[in-house]
Image (cartoon, rainbow, N blue to C red):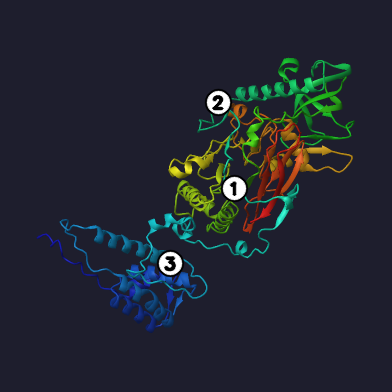
Amino acid sequence: MADPEPDAVSVPLPVSVEAVLRELALFELRCDGADVTDKLLELCLSHSLDPVTLANELLAFVTSKALDPQLSPEALSAFEHEVLSRRDRRIPPPRRTDSRCLHDVHTLQGLHLLEEEEEEQLLDSYCTPAKGPQKRSSSTPENPHPKRSSSTHSPYKLLTPNSFSPSAAPSPQYSARTNRGSVVASFGPIHDITWEGRGGVDCTPKPFSPPERSLSRSYSFMFQRAADVREVLLWRMEQIGAALRSHHCIPEFGSLLLPAQDSVTVLGRIGCDSNGKLNPKSAVLEGDRERSAGAQIPLELSELQEFSLFPGQVVVVEGTNSTGRRLVVSKLYEGVPLPFHTPKDPAQGAAGGGQCVVLVVSGPFTPSDSVAFEPLQDLIEVIARQRPDVCVLFGPFIDTKHEQVESCRLLLPFAELFRLCVRSLLDGTRSAGTHLVFVPSQRDAHHDFVYPQPPFVCPELPKEDKARVHFMPDPCTLDINGVVLGLTSTDLLFHMGAEEISSSSGTSDRFTRILQHILTQRSFYPLYPPAEEMNVDYESFSSFASLPVTPHVLIIPSELRYFVKEVLGCVCINPGRLTKGRAAGTYGQLCLQPRWDGEQKNPCVAAQVVRI
């Protein structure tokens, strides 16, 4: 048998009504009447379609238009006019398959544009059409269609939703908000403050801790042993116990194991005697290793008028242990905060030349029902308008709890989408000169799921932006002209709020109690055992999750209600989330005025929480 000619054109097979009806039945598309079947056969013959292609095109048309699966002559006429006629105009002339055909830059560009147009048409056919009339701009030599690569020149075009999601549309609930820009919480004389910065002039953030105490790269985790965890917990107990003993002038600590009729003072860690939540009847004290050999004893708290306890809290307890089986507590020492940082050179703060405006923003940066990243674009406009000196950006940037991330409907890899967010922020804030500080979150889909969490890695930064972009770990302490900021994206308020128990004779604020625990326990995450959603590596925890000093400002984003308050001399702020589900959220602003003239005043003179 002779071989077929290489340039022979294949002749389509004959089309039968039975074949067409069989393919339509696979997609539950029905048709009754000879006029409908004749029309289907006519469409196949006049537009050179095989039954499979016709069924696929009809399914896309019926789905996008939300039509009845029962096909009618009117629907087929509309299908021919809107789909097949446009498809015929789009079919290119036959291409030579000869390998000797050479392409120049113009033919390659034409083929590339044709492939892009076919992809866009295919996506459009499966997407729900937007309401209202839409006009497609025509491409001319004077006004050509923009190439995809040209979007990198505009920060607002980088995050074009159709580039990474086939069903992207702005969130109607976010777009319909009416209270944008309103102040919902404040601290200090906010009306006397000018909330416009100087674009980072004489205001450079840097890690407060030395390099050997700062987490700067990824590390191996999931290899810790129970003995290593125990050593870290006992080390923390000894550190805090020494501070309590020195502060309260306690002669020595006793043992939990020895019954005594007299009052005894013991050091230990609060725990629970069961797998349930802590309550006053289930509280136990786990003693230290040196004096109590790590033994546990139930606590009787009925004689205490006021207390606030949580699992993992290191305390010193004074009480009676007459039987050796229960400790009746009469006094509780809960902890002592670290001192504040004061620069060795008082002129360090004055070198900043005045106040420093800091923006504090926590993700998610797009509503849960959209990937249009409208909140991120609105934030870029705020930065460009106010020119803050520093903007601290907490994750999640690519939220694991987002609807389209959970259902795997994004077309781009998570890491690539994060790079688009970074590029949008860089291009949109370059003229403002604002320093950008990125802090990761455990909910970032593209990053290491471990605590402490290493900083993001983004080596493709432009040279002109490297000096003003800072990737920090979670948690960390930041130094801005001598002012120390404690940063963590972990929702510790929510985790500790679910475990803390308290008793108070007067009005008691749970947020204030939890913040006091964080400062007096000298840790960014003093809760033990940690929340189920946390993956804590305690070997790194001992090195990178402790507070080196009491920060002047503690920034602790949470799902709970936003606030700004001063606790133990530290200004604590929960800026809220930029988006909360499908609704718009809030962000924070700080005004720092470093002053080291001997007055014990916090350099954060004002703060506020603003709706995006």
At 43% from the left edge and 71% from the top edge, which residue is drawn? 61
Badge 2 element? helix
* Residue 491 position in % (x across, y down): 66, 42
Mark earlier in primary sequence (3, 1) = 3
Residue 585, quarter of the rendered image: bottom right
CB of mark 2 within 8 Å of CB of mark 3?
no
Mark earlier in primary sequence (2, 3) = 3
At 77% from the left edge and 35% from the top edge, which residue is drawn? 568
What amino acid does circle 1 point to? Arg
Q: Which residue is mark 2?
A: 212
Mark earlier in primary sequence (1, 2) = 1
Label 1 neighbour load within 10 Å: few <14, some 14-19, many 20+: some
Quadrant of the snapshot with the C terminus:
bottom right
* Residue 197 position in % (x across, y down): 61, 48
Q: Residue furthest left?
A: 2
Q: Is residue 157 left or right of residue 140?
A: right
How far apart, in angstroms, are the residues tagged by discs 2 and 3? 53 Å
What amino acid does circle 2 point to? Glu
CB of mark 3 within 8 Å of CB of mark 1?
no
How far apart, in angstroms, are the residues tagged by discs 1 and 2? 32 Å
* Residue 85 position in % (x across, y down): 34, 76
Badge 3 element? helix
Residue 124: numbered disc: 3
Q: Is residue 523 left or right of residue 440?
A: right
Q: Is residue 339 above or below residue 102?
A: above
